[in-house]
């Protein structure tokens, strides 16, 4: 979606997507939203306990 489309971003977040960043493409700027499984979001809180084996 176009960069700065707050209504579109809110709609995407309500559908389970998460806003990540804005990217510049040839001739336009877009907002990037992603869908992540719950286990990705859960594990990211444990940055100090990174498995080494």
Image (cartoon, rainbow, N blue to C red):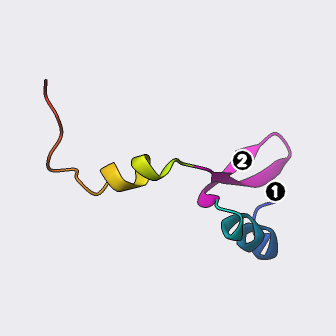
Question: Which residue, given by chain and number where applicable, does mark 2 sit on?
Answer: 24
> Per the image, is 7 magenta?
no
Q: Nearer the viewer, residue 3 or 19?
A: 19
Side of 16 relative to 9 (left or right): left
Please rate how many residues cluster around mark 1, counting C-alpha atoms within 10 Å: few if below 14, some from 14 to 19, many from 20.
Answer: some
Residue, far right = 27
Above or below: residue 17 compared with residue 6:
above
Among numbered discs 2 and 1, the one appearing first in the sequence: 1
Residue ID at (71%, 64%): 15
Q: Which residue occupies 62% across, 50% down?
A: 34
Determine the secondary structure under disc 2: strand
x and y percentages locating residue 5 in the rendered image: 80, 70
Question: Residue 2: which quarter of the image?
Answer: bottom right
Q: Magenta span: helix, strand or loop, mainly?
A: strand
Query: Would you place residue 9 above or below residue 51 in this image?
Result: below
Give the spatial CA distance, label 2 vs label 1.
Answer: 12 Å
Tell me which residue sits at (13%, 23%) in the image.
53
Q: Position of residue 29 (x, y in %)?
A: 77, 53
Query: Which quarter of the rendering shows the N terminus?
Result: bottom right
Residue of label 1: 1
The stretch in magenta equals 17-35
């Amino acid at each position: 979606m176009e960069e700065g489309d707050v209504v579109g971003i809110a709609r995407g977040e309500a559908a389970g997507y998460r806003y990540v960043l804005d990217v510049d493409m040839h001739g336009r700027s877009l907002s990037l939203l992603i869908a992540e499984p719950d286990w990705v979001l859960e594990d990211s809180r444990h940055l100090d306990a990174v498995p080494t084996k």
